[in-house]
Amino acid sequence: MNEVIVGGMRFALDLSQPLYEQVLDQVRSSIAKGEIALGEKIPSVREMAQALKINPNTVMRAYQELERDGLTETRRGQGTFITTDAEKVRLIRYRLAEEAVDEFLAKLGSLGFTPSEVAAILRSKGGEA
Amino acid sequence: MNEVIVGGMRFALDLSQPLYEQVLDQVRSSIAKGEIALGEKIPSVREMAQALKINPNTVMRAYQELERDGLTETRRGQGTFITTDAEKVRLIRYRLAEEAVDEFLAKLGSLGFTPSEVAAILRSKGGEA
Amino acid sequence: MNEVIVGGMRFALDLSQPLYEQVLDQVRSSIAKGEIALGEKIPSVREMAQALKINPNTVMRAYQELERDGLTETRRGQGTFITTDAEKVRLIRYRLAEEAVDEFLAKLGSLGFTPSEVAAILRSKGGEA
Amino acid sequence: MNEVIVGGMRFALDLSQPLYEQVLDQVRSSIAKGEIALGEKIPSVREMAQALKINPNTVMRAYQELERDGLTETRRGQGTFITTDAEKVRLIRYRLAEEAVDEFLAKLGSLGFTPSEVAAILRSKGGEA
DNA sequence: GTGGTCTAGACCACG
DNA sequence: GTGGTCTAGACCACA
């Protein structure tokens, strides 16, 4: 495993997706799961880049997207902090889940699976869905 | 909607993904769903390109990937035909479904949803999974 | 097996190579192996095409190449006949073998195999070479 | 000879085969022979294209096939690198050799040569097989 | 800078 | 007619 822990968050990067997207997803996921507390400071771009051994531009892009989503805010001269707005976090978590579900159902539908077949596959996968 | 029907298959292209991948996915879907019969000829590269208003090279790339997957065979000078091997189609359909499921569960998991929460969301979405 | 016997020669066609080349190879091979006698008549282009369920142009092209090699001769109004020159057959057989050997050694060499490794692989393949 | 050395690899292109296939074969050979170390970067698409005086798209096609075979991985924005998985290289080298052997034996067999004749020809060719 | 996608258009081999 | 290769050149996303 190529895992790194930075600022209390766990990162595992691969080449299958853009790096900035993986960083974004993994920070967002840490927030959604509550692994990192609201209002807490996250590592600086430079620290994060060094820890993950990736280009600072890549981290920067991920951070910018987090801020656009309202999940973080930068305080000049102090760094980047997780939002303190729990409702915002809840909404974003829900929105991401909904998107994933829609995409999933669309894909399975396009392969001609009925809802009950989907359920069967999910069950066989260990989810008790 | 910008839909086109070609050779009994429905196509709707957008810019969110590579065109060749969309063509690939949609032909594959048609095969997986059985909308197009085994052994049947699919439209020639040029026909398809003209119908979808895209470049023949782009269609060709999709067709070559289909052949690599074993879903089609090309007969020189005659065209491109769906495989007659039903087992191969079944396997690929299953593989695609499995990939979608894995991706879905990973994403929802990374957002901190438990299996039963996932099931609840799916139910609310109209699937009775 | 998708085999057809025509004029005493065995044919099995697939899509991995040009059809005309397969026809050419298989006729040549029948001659080289002595499965078809010198001076004998081979089926007409039309007969052959019908038997193999391929385009007459494809058969024609194979026959033309055979004639260019001197393995056959056409007698106007009578058809196509295997040469009666045994020496020519011997030479062509040897030339084809030599080409195959050269190509084979070149390929294995390009993969960095030593002669003794090649010999080992050949032995493991059932040839006692 | 129209040879070019690029990134420690030797290239000689002709018109007997598709260019992208020749590039593919020659890079693959270099990897199989260990002429280029695992994990090493190979020349960028543009560099290679310029050096070989062919179109970047042609090089790209070769590189994509290498990646599909698992012999290389591409790091976005950084370039294309030889895999670090020695086992994968070993397997592919063996697979290529096996294919060559099978093809060779089939061809010689179709010309009616017995295994011992094949062995004799090989010996006379300088291999001591 | 890197790889990746797409286009337009030429040319070839095969059937 | 079919698929396949190649080019030139544009444009994009990523690091």
Image (tube, coloured by chain):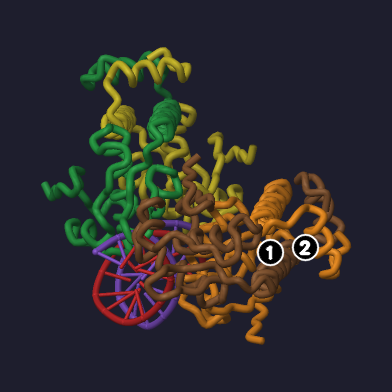
Chain colours: A brown, B orange, C yellow, D green, E purple, F red
Q: What residue do we see at 55% from left, 58% from top?
A: A26
Vertical order, D56 against D121 (above or below): below
Question: Percent position (x, y) of residue C48?
Answer: 55, 48
Chain letter behind tag 2: A
- Where in the figure is residue C65, as x and y percent of width and height? 36, 48
Question: Picture coordinates of residue A44 (x, y %)?
Answer: 40, 62
Query: What is the count of numbered marks?
Result: 2
> Marks 1 and 2, how far apart in space?
8 Å
SS assignment at label 2: loop
Q: Quadrant of residue A82?
A: bottom right
Q: Residues within 10 Å of mark 1 (few under 14, many from 20)?
A: many
Mark 2 neighbour density, 10 Å: few (under 14) some (14–19) many (20 or more): some
- The answer, for residue D114, to whether it is visible in the render is yes
Q: Amino acid at mark 1?
A: Ser
User: Is residue B92 in view?
Assistant: no
The label on residue B83 is none
Residue at image mark 1:
B29
Quadrant of the rendered image containing residue E14? bottom left
Pointer 1 with pointer 2, Cβ within 8 A? yes
The residue labelled by disc 2 is A112
Q: Residue furthest left?
A: D1
Quarter placement of the N terminus of chain B? bottom right
Image spot of residue B30 (x, y percent):
70, 65
